[in-house]
Image (cartoon, helix red, strand yellow):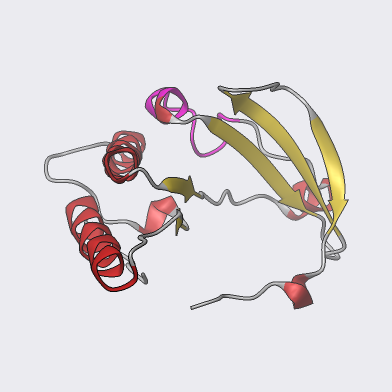
Amino acid sequence: MHCPNWKIERVVSELRARHFALLATRGQGYDLVVLDYLQRLGRPEGHYAEHEALAANVRGFSDAANELNIAALMTSQVSRTTRELSEAEPPSLDEGLGTGDIERCSNQLVALAINGIRTTVRYAVRKQTFGEAGYSGELPYNSRRMQILG
């Protein structure tokens, strides 16, 4: 779903409709749903600060995914300076997220940083409910192999 500036209620409604349509026609709904760029969702009703709106959107999407028994991957992007990009260190939780609510309702939080020449990505597992957390590493990265599948 391409849904910039949609409110979370609309995203959840669309997710449910498409999931149940797949169940009816193919006998199987979604296994995994990816919500990219949390900051692009519309703000919920009310006067929320940015971090509160982000947390409310994450809670709404997470609750819907749990209700439908679908794995959900939500991503958030953090702007960094050129110097920081060259170091390719994964962001900490307080860069962009750090609301507390997001961390509490997530089973796993992984931070990624792609180096400036796009050949490696460093990762850090910040939280993992059902396994080990606090470790990091580096993997090869090839942006030419990245594709969006419909």
Quarter of the picture containing the N terminus is: bottom left
What percent of the width, then of the height, locates residue 68? 29, 46
Residue in front for this viewpoint, 117 or 138: 138
**Residue 60, visible in the rendered structure:** yes
At 77% from the left and 77% from the top, the residue drawn is 144
**What span is colored magenta in the figure?**
93-104
Q: Is residue 96 magenta?
A: yes
What x and y, as percent, mark residue 130? 59, 23
> In terms of image quadrants, where is residue 49?
top left
Of 93 and 110, which appears nearest the observer?
110
Q: Main secondary structure of the magenta part?
A: loop
In this picture, residue 52 sits left or right of residue 74: left
x, y percent for residue 17: 20, 64
Give above or below for 102 relative to 100.
below
Left or right: residue 134 versus residue 59 is right
Q: Is residue 97 magenta?
A: yes
Q: Residue at x 18, y 52 (%)?
A: 9
